[in-house]
Image: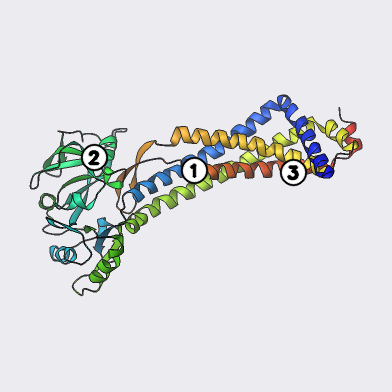
Amino acid sequence: MAGPINWLSQVVSVTGFGVLSIPQRRGSVAAAVIGIAGVVAVLVGVLSIGAGFKRVMEMSASPDSAMVLRASATSEMVSGLSREDTKLITDAPGIARNAEGPLASAELFVIIDLPKRSTNSSANVPLRGIEPAGFAVRDNLKIVEGRKFEWGKNEIVVGVGALQEFAGLELGKTVRVGRNDWTVVGIFSAGGGSADSELWTDAKVLQAAYKRGDSFQSVSVRLTSPQAFQEFKNALTANPKLKVKVLRQTEYYAEQSTMITTLVNSLGYIIASLMAIGAVFGALNTMYNSVSARTREIATLRALGFGRGAVIVSIMFESIVLALVGGTLGAAVAYFVFNGFHTSTINMQSFSQVTFAFAVTVSLLVQGIVLATFIGLVGGFLPAIRAARLPIAVGLREM
């Protein structure tokens, strides 16, 4: 055991010299740490946008719920179903029922233009027309202020996310949609799902306002159990009178989040990669300065019998520790600045605004720390090799 213990003591000794020399090169050390912190903060911050959007979409889904669209439709916006279609769908097996009938809601989805609170611009906001079972289909929905709209009237209820992001949606306010005025009679929460970004009203009233006749765009259903989905799907796809696409809610909302999360993640990795290149050069500069500042000490230790391996490991260790300090600082900044920050963005598939909060997850923090460690490894490798290969005689002559 003497060998490993002796080698470890050598590593500690060389590392100690490096730590003692930090005050002499505090400028380059601070620059490297802050540079790495910036890389990690940007990476985690950008990726938290995609994570937050994805979380909203996942929270919109229930394992025992399904959606029916027109065959080949990619979203509700481009779907279309007739009244005859919706009757066949609501009669299918596997749908849960209560005293009022099947838990199925044929729905209309239109886009209206509303001003944003934070800017002078306006944005597309989804207005959803539902049938009486629409509230029961979504078990996580509750009225938090006011009341539900009355059927047959120009009344709407507003999601908490839409209320936070868009102006003029307070309880009691009137919203001008097309040629009609709609009174806000209630505020609802959908547990953080995408419905929080929507306005809801009676589907029949919305059909009349937009001259949609008796057509719908989707049917949302509650199943008797998650296992009933296949029976429900088979019954609809086998019906020659129907040409529909049947999805679990989880599948539908996963598809809805794909485009945004892919775009955001790609941009995040590209930006972080470019910044990481600069951070690597910063780390190289810092560690080269470290080696230069203690050339004589390293040569003296080598002359006393210290091995090259101990020198390499100690310098690499110092580089990684500095990188981890920067990575931890960047992760902390990202968490406290970005986590929970509320905003809205357009859903590319429905062309409507979705409100969500940035989500700095454990996975993203780990990614940031791993990136910082990699920068430290790359930035410390060449200086460590240079220090180990430095001739002892040359090092001893350094002043």
Q: Residue furthest right?
A: 393
SS at circle 1: helix
Distance (Cα) linking label 2 and label 1: 35 Å
SS at circle 3: helix
Which mark is in front, 3 or 1? 1
Distance (Cα) linking label 3 and label 2: 57 Å
Label 2 or label 1, whichever comes before in sequence order: 2
393 vs 373, nearest the viewer: 373
Query: Which quadrant holds residue 9?
Result: top right
Indicate the quadrant containing the C terminus: top left, top right, bottom left or bottom right: top right
Q: What residue type is disc 1 on?
A: Val
Q: Percent x, y for residue 174?
A: 14, 36
Q: Find residue 281 and name its label.
A: none
Label 3 or label 1, whichever comes before in sequence order: 1
Q: What residue type is disc 3 on?
A: Leu
Q: Percent x, y for residue 367?
A: 54, 45
Q: Percent x, y for residue 200?
A: 19, 46
Q: Find residue 114 and name its label.
A: 2
Which mark is in front, 2 or 1? 1
Distance (Cα) linking label 3 and label 1: 32 Å
Residue that numbered label 3 is attached to = 382
Query: Which quadrant holds residue 372?
Result: top right
357 vs 275, nearest the viewer: 357
